[in-house]
Image (tube, coloured by chain):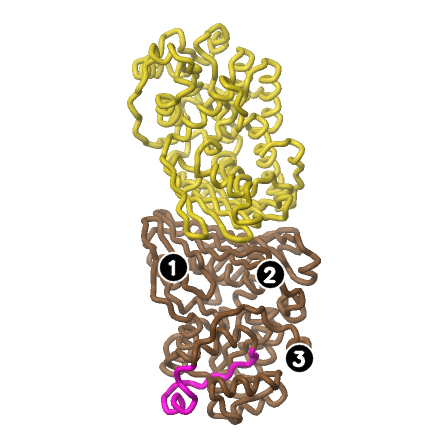
Chain colours: A yellow, B brown
Amino acid sequence: MKKISRRVFNSTFGLGLGLMVTKPKACFSEVKKGKKLGIALVGLGTYSEYELAPSLQETDYCYLAGIVTGTPKKEKIWADKYKIPKENIYNYDNFDAIATNDAIDIVYVVLPNAMHAEFCIRAAKAGKHVICEKPMAVSVQECDDIIDACKTAGVKLSVGYRLHSEPYTQEIMRLVREKTYGAVRYVSADAAYFSRTDPDQWRLNKALSGGGALMNMGVYAIQSAIYGTGQNPISVTAQEFSTRPEYFKDTDETITAQFEFPNGAIGNIFTSHNTNINRLFTSFDKGWVELNPANNYGPLSGRTSDGKELKYPHERQQKLQMDDFSKHILKGTPNIVPGEMGKRDMIIVAAIYQSIKEGGKKIVLDLGSMGIL
Amino acid sequence: MKKISRRVFNSTFGLGLGLMVTKPKACFSEVKKGKKLGIALVGLGTYSEYELAPSLQETDYCYLAGIVTGTPKKEKIWADKYKIPKENIYNYDNFDAIATNDAIDIVYVVLPNAMHAEFCIRAAKAGKHVICEKPMAVSVQECDDIIDACKTAGVKLSVGYRLHSEPYTQEIMRLVREKTYGAVRYVSADAAYFSRTDPDQWRLNKALSGGGALMNMGVYAIQSAIYGTGQNPISVTAQEFSTRPEYFKDTDETITAQFEFPNGAIGNIFTSHNTNINRLFTSFDKGWVELNPANNYGPLSGRTSDGKELKYPHERQQKLQMDDFSKHILKGTPNIVPGEMGKRDMIIVAAIYQSIKEGGKKIVLDLGSMGIL
């Protein structure tokens, strides 16, 4: 297992996305009385700070019970803000002691990609259920290692695919599944944001991220293409583009890829760290459906060829996601985002990088046997 | 010059698009008194019947003065319907005698693609201005032959790019040119329709069409990508997909292609004869603009990231197009769609086919020196 310097990690974590933090609506002692599962966040970067922790104030089946951080000053800030007792606060060295802490049911690993495998496996070995933030890891082998560790430990595993739990994406999946507009023929998915302010961020450091736009936003585009067709791709071709090598020293800036699906539908994806785009369009024999935005934190927006506007009450996607996984554990509902889904997407990511390396060659995929959609 | 059997052509021409024909609002003797230019349509297939002839009842600077057809029974139908005098009716054999007919100022060649060059060159030699329907020809060499013939004859030449004259597309071009939303970073253009009813149509016969989806709808996607960036691409990669080889025996069914533009923007196009899609999306530093539909006969529809709806009164695009060219001839306004634009797009088409043939290899383009946008 590759070890990443925590100093490098701590100095580079975070994208500076500025969103308002909601006020906690339930303190630790209150939620402890209920049947909510206790979640410990591992890694207190911007995503934990601005998305997961606020979402955990709104969840019905889980709550923020603990934190794991390599930054001592964050311990007090978070403890005060979220009423986290001292015994539920860990650093990366004493993290394994979480095994004996009954207040923690789920460990959510929100570290840079290259650290996912190590901490997911340590969490599993500690007997905790695991949520691994996307992308699941930096290689298919690491995904297998995580899946195996969870199986061995008898714990549940999910991946941080928040969109799988939110209603706009679920409506796309329903329209595809029920063939409301007939058979699907084409899906176009663009997922990109413009990175330009922080060349030292971990996402631009391949040792920490495992890759650039594709590993970050590209995973959304891959997921969108599968949402939009209801199928796993059977082949992929891909291309890479670079315009700012001085900024993107180490990672891919822009990638396009094309998918073939079993029913003949074609997928066309675009992902980039060089522009802001956020779309899913899927075309059927008798119409089309699109989301724009399709993959940000919402509210999303959608419309159909017959003039319908998709409109759902907005809830934090991460709230829905963590509740879905908690219900899986508490009530035995299906795990809608199992670890195998993260592994499947990492197989696709690896095939895209391989196609690029081989000059755009078609890479055949065999994902059907995974049984994951 | 490759000769196409007129029997094959006559038996296969037409797609069966059923649109209502408007009633002529001006008869031949009326318009003859004005300063309108006389247009002769060469080839009376569905596009002439349902689009060009009706549009020529609404044009301000030109009118339907003559026809050239290989189908004798069409002569009387068109003559009666549009009050076309006998002396302005030609067939493919006596067509060259049009040289002595002062009633005909412009010849609009609406034949299958492989016949464009022959008839455009014959029209130029007859001293007539020429509109060549898109795609301009089936090779770059043929485009050059047409351009050279028109130069030698001292006649004007345009290509049937109706969108260049219509307000939605012009607004996209303006927003790009004026950088209303900042610099352009990405353009996505999909142009496709589902062909499934007539395997014998000329568009599916390579000898007549020169190619499939790319030659037909792909040219719109190429144009859209250029509208959406205000630049000519500097490289192209491309992929071909096939799911119904029994129907698309001879021509490409689906093609994706990626463009690089001089400023670093990326283009991602999709064209197909296997689904209905009609979109242009262009993303800038500070927003996006899209048309959907973007390339059908209208009314088009558009919107922007800041919530604006693009809305213009609908006029027949072909009316605007033929009036623009006629104004160019009558008043010396710029020829906004010169033959070189058709040639440029044929260079891009050829590069796309070449990239596909070479397994997706990047083909470098040098279109900057053409001075065409």
B347 is higher (above) or lower (below) than A279: below
Q: Which of the chains bears the disc numbered 3?
A: B
| Residue that carries the numbered disc 1 in the rendered image | B172
Decide: few, some or many residues near mark 2? Use Cα within 10 Å; few <14, some 14-19, many ≥20. many
B87 is higher (above) or lower (below) than B221: below
- The CA distance from mark 1 to mark 3 is 40 Å
Is residue A52 visible to us here?
yes
CB atoms at circles 1 and 3 under 8 Å apart? no
Q: Which residue occupies 53% across, 28% down? A: A337
Q: Which range is magenta?
A: B24-44
**Residue B337 in the image: x percent, y percent?**
45, 71
Magenta span has B34? yes
Looking at the rendered image, the quarter that the N terminus of chain A falls into is top right
Badge 1 marks a residue whose secondary structure is: helix
Q: Which residue occupies 37% across, 10% down? A: A33
Q: Which of the chains bears the disc numbered 2?
A: B
Give left or right: position of B84 versus A300: right
| Residue that carries the numbered disc 2 in the rendered image | B195
Looking at the rendered image, the quarter that the C terminus of chain A falls into is top right
| Residue that carries the numbered disc 3 in the rendered image | B6
